Amino acid sequence: MLFEFATATRIVFGEGTAATLPDLVRSFGARPLVVTGASTERAAWLVAALSAEVFAASGEPTVELIREGARRVQDSACDVVVSLGGGSAIDAGKAIAAVAANGGEPLEFLEVVGKGRAMALPPLPFLAVPTTAGTGSEVTRNAVLGSTEHGVKASLRSPLMLPRIALVDPELTYGLPPAITAATGLDALTQLIEPYVSARANPLADAFCVEGIGRIAGALRRVYRDGADREARRNMALASLFGGLALANAGLGVVHGFAAPLGGSWKAPHGALCAALLPHGMAANVAALRARAPRHPALERYAAIARLLTGRSEASAADGIDWVRALCIELNVPPLRAWGIAEADLPGVVEKAAHASSMKANPLPLTGEELLQVATAAW
Ligand SMILES: [Zn+2]
């Protein structure tokens, strides 16, 4: 057995820890850039406490946005970057800190559609503070960027890009509306299920997956119904963090393989796409494993997932899929067509998904026909 496990230098978790953020940021630099989502209001307290520059990352980050952010860092001589927001704001800040320190051109380093050059210089110190419980991006070493020109999403990736501090304060998620709570929470669940059955699964990531799936099973319905449920919000925040740790070290699978091209071509939030695809991706993998690799360890792992989700010791892989399907209905997850995707678009999406980097870690390769079935079922 051989595996590596990399994570943020320091993880700070707990209710109220956001109050320590200004001091933490100052310990890294005197001229911070605060990166937030479209509404900068949420970060006003931090910007004021730090007399910082503020940069709004509206929507999921693009190559153009990162170029603009890197220019802001250079023009204002910023020496530390802190993101306070959802996955988009965190990925944007992470990419800006890296690109600004390495010459300012994202396409030099972007995988798939760019030159994919390795980062030579360490990024500016970067602190990540999530306000959703979903992406786990605060502990990963990549930032997903859309390229409008190419209609896909691709990663900037470097071991140097791990945030210096990941500060997770569940109180920051209390105000999330139910639809975003559902989409981000199901993304977190996907990011615990896919690494657990992944071709790159390893015992350390497994521990985070098992712990995280169990927490989501009890908490996701609760936070959807009552956003102020402290215990359930804490469990979701932990599960999201564990998902980030797991995916960064064990990879993902078919659901994220689809989320990359879909998110690159349609304006749909990443979490909502994963939520729509999750039960169908699980079903396709279980059917393909049964048909072609009945002794594959991932099959028993799907049964273990079912036991964690249902709390029943005799639950089968199929019960786990049914549980996720029922949860998606209860949480009003919209199908793919709700995002403007036409049925005629699906074959093209399948073509791109087959080559997505996340697909490589799927427990077994799925055929084009199987992939089309997943997309059609989620449509
Ligand atoms: Zn995801």
Image (spheres, rainbow, N blue to C red):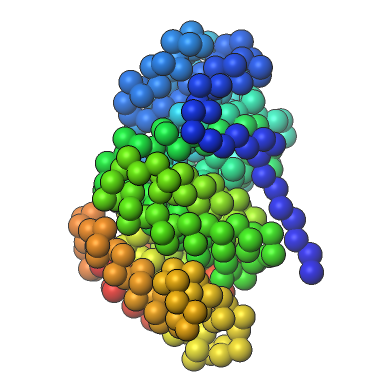
Q: Residue 58 vs residue 155: left or right? A: left
- Residue 356 in the image: state x and y as whole percent: 50, 61
- Residue 81 in the image: state x and y as whole percent: 56, 23
Q: Can residue 269 be seen in this view?
A: no
How many callouts does the rendering have? 0
Farthest top residue in view: 51
In this rendering, is residue 301 above or below 97?
below
Q: Residue at x 46, y 44 (%)?
A: 234
Q: Residue at x 60, y 28 (%)?
A: 126
In this rendering, is residue 148 above or below 4?
above
- Quarter of the image where one finds residue 172: top left
Task: Pick the residue in front: 206 or 275.
Answer: 206
Q: Is residue 291 visible?
A: yes
Farthest right residue in view: 1
Q: Quadrant of the C terminus?
A: bottom left
- Residue 250 in the image: state x and y as whole percent: 62, 60
Q: Quadrant of the N terminus?
A: bottom right
Q: Residue at x 50, y 89 (%)?
A: 290
Q: Residue 24 vs residue 370: left or right? A: right
In this rendering, is residue 160 above or below 249?
above
Task: Pick the residue in front: 184 or 168.
Answer: 168
- Quarter of the image where one finds residue 202: bottom right
- Residue 29 in the image: state x and y as whole percent: 64, 15
Q: Which residue is drawn at 48% across and 57% down?
A: 215
In this rendering, is residue 86 above or below 378?
above
